[in-house]
């Protein structure tokens, strides 16, 4: 299927590559169908664009949290597990949505740590896990000296 997008123009989307978020994303509940778009010549991508198929002007930059030094240990409720069609751990991808904010007159890109995306890559269904309490497991690498 061909989809017109704001960022990428007209894009050919394989229907088998559609990711469904049955509940939408926070603030965008009416957009439930998405696809991942990235530049083919960029090599292995660290980030992707999650493009809405329901609203051509809606797209989110997402990134694997491990590339930023974050590891999530998420407990899914029975309802969330059912929505994701009870995936095995190897079929689950956790991604962070990036957002832009102004700090001191400068634009800063930050990850949304409290609401990662959880995607069953095999069934192509996902949800946004909004966490009331947040205790990140942060991995720091490249430390120059021992403490």
Image (spheres, rainbow, N blue to C red):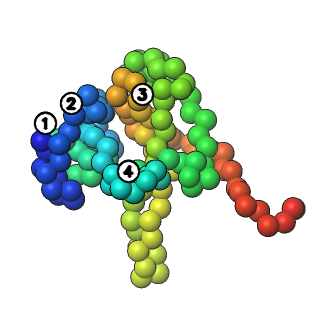
User: Which residue in the structure is indicated by mark 3?
Assistant: 120
Q: Residues within 10 Å of mark 4 (few under 14, many from 20)?
A: some
Q: Quadrant of the C terminus?
A: bottom right
Q: Secondary structure at mark 1?
A: loop
Q: Residues within 10 Å of mark 2 (few under 14, many from 20)?
A: few
- Gap between marks 1 and 3, in whole Å? 22 Å
The reply to whether callout 2 and callout 1 are in contact (CB within 8 Å) is: yes
The mark that comes first in sequence, 2 or 4, is 2
User: Which residue in the structure is indicated by mark 4?
Assistant: 48
The reply to whether residue 27 is visible in this rendering is: no
User: Which residue in the structure is indicated by mark 2?
Assistant: 15
- Gap between marks 2 and 3, in whole Å? 16 Å
- Gap between marks 3 and 4, in whole Å? 16 Å
Q: Secondary structure at mark 3?
A: strand
Q: Residues within 10 Å of mark 1 (few under 14, many from 20)?
A: few
> Position of 58 compared to 4: left or right?
right
The mark that comes first in sequence, 1 or 4, is 1
Q: Residue visible at 38% across and 50% down?
A: 48
């Amino acid at each position: 299927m061909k989809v017109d997008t704001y960022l990428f123009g007209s894009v050919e989307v394989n229907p088998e590559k559609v990711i469904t978020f049955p509940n939408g994303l926070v603030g965008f509940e009416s957009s439930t169908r998405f696809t991942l778009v990235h530049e083919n010549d960029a090599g292995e991508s660290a980030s992707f664009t999650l493009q809405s198929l329901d609203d051509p002007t809606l797209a989110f930059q997402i990134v694997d949290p491990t590339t930023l030094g974050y590891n999530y240990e998420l407990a899914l409720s029975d309802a969330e597990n059912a929505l994701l069609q009870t995936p095995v751990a190897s079929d689950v991808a956790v991604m962070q949505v990036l957002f832009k904010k102004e700090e001191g007159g400068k634009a800063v890109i930050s990850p949304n740590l409290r609401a990662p995306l959880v995607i069953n890559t095999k069934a192509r269904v996902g949800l946004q896990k909004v966490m009331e309490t947040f205790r990140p497991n942060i991995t720091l690498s490249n430390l120059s000296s021992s403490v």
